[in-house]
Image (tube, rainbow, N blue to C red):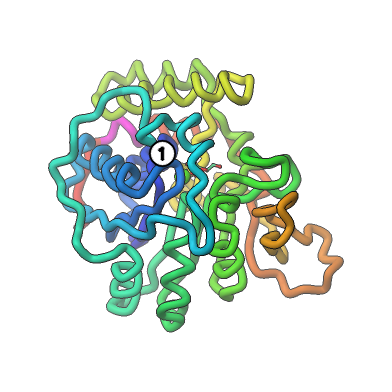
Amino acid sequence: MKQIIMDCDPGHDDAIALLLASRSDQIKILGVTTVAGNSELENTSRNARKILDYADIFDVPVYAGCSTPMMRDLYRLTGAIIHGEDGLGGPTLPDPVTPIEQEHGVDFIIRTLRQAEEKIILVPTGPLTNIAMALIKAPDIKDKIEKIVIMGGAVVDPGNITSAAEFNIYVDPEAAKIVFASGCNIYLNTLDISMKAVFYEEDIERVRAQGDKVSDIVARLLDFFADTHVKHFGFRACPIHDALCIGVLIDESLVEFQKVFLDISVNDPLTLGETVADLWGITGNEPNCYISMKVDREKFVDMIAEHMKKPYISKN
Ligand code: RIB
Ligand code: CA
């Protein structure tokens, strides 16, 4: 059983990543920490609990993390136009009944890692603020981190917030720089690859036709997501970016990775948040992460469809 802490900013694709992890018989979610990103922290924290409650997941605690990036104001634009004003636009989900935990998300990450008997996998799918803050506050936790599976970055293809940068890294580039310099075992699922694993209309209809309540809400979330992608990117398809981070934990053959040296631009306004990867090893720098290079889209679509119709079975 892979024990994970999911750090997220729900967000449509974060929500589906949570549902996928909850339905996998290989993954135990120790807790969810939320971060400001797609929307303000209050919204991402409510959205995480909304989706968990809706999917009958009442034994996974949710901890609110950092409400702003480490050194910048929260970038409030793109999240809203892609994910809606409250971060989870489209279908109306009931208000959560699960309360938010009182402990800060960063403290939960530190405490859980320190107390862990086995190494834990961190799965950040929003800005890396909470992860960076935990590593700064308690460097000793590195020994308890099996790996960090991140959604973020754009290496060969253009970004989605600027031509140079992907949203999660752009929102808190200093946090990303800290995480990639930490020496932790990092797997980065980039925009280059998540944009090659999109859900088309027929894939959304396949999930909707499954008829159970989770498949239905996923289809309705993707309807909204597809609408905003048509409006702002000109194509009607859903890149479920964050769910790939869970997908590779379920089936490592889903994505092929390459080990590279990667660093983040933080000083130049033109390239702020750019993930610069040394693909050819020409810098001589020691590789510090694995980046996604290839994905099996059909396998991903099948995985999402198969898992959404499964009932939730508690692993706690
Ligand atoms: O660029 C895509 C990422 O930004 C995803 O994690 C999405 O949820 C948004 O946070
Ligand atoms: Ca996200």
- What kind of residue is marked 1? Gly
* Direction front: furthest residue: 73
Horizontal placement of 11 versus 267: left or right? left
Location of residue 293 with respect to 133 vertically, above or below: above
Q: Choose top left, top right, bottom left or bottom right for residue 306.
A: top left
Disc 1 target residue: 11
Query: For residue 205, what is the image quadrant?
Result: top left
Q: Is residue 14 above or below residue 206?
A: below
Residue 280 position in % (x across, y down): 83, 60
Nearer to the camera, 186 or 255: 186
Please state the horizontal and vertical placement of residue 52, each as a whole percent of the image.
24, 42
Which percent across, then down, holds residue 286? 73, 74
Q: Determine whether the residue tagged by mark 1 lies in a helix, strand or loop.
A: loop
- Residue 279, position as x, y percentages in the image: 78, 58
Q: Tell me which residue sits at (27%, 58%) in the image.
A: 63
Q: Is disc 1's CB within 8 Å of ligand 1?
A: yes
Residue at x-position 24% and y-position 29%: 93
Residue ID at (48%, 58%): 69
Query: Closer to the camera, 233 or 259?
Result: 233
Quadrant including the C terminus: bottom left
Q: Which residues are magenta?
A: 306-310
Which residue is at the far left? 97
Q: Quadrant of the N terminus?
A: bottom left
Is residue 28 visible in the rendered image? The answer is no
Q: Do we see residue 238 in this rendering?
A: yes
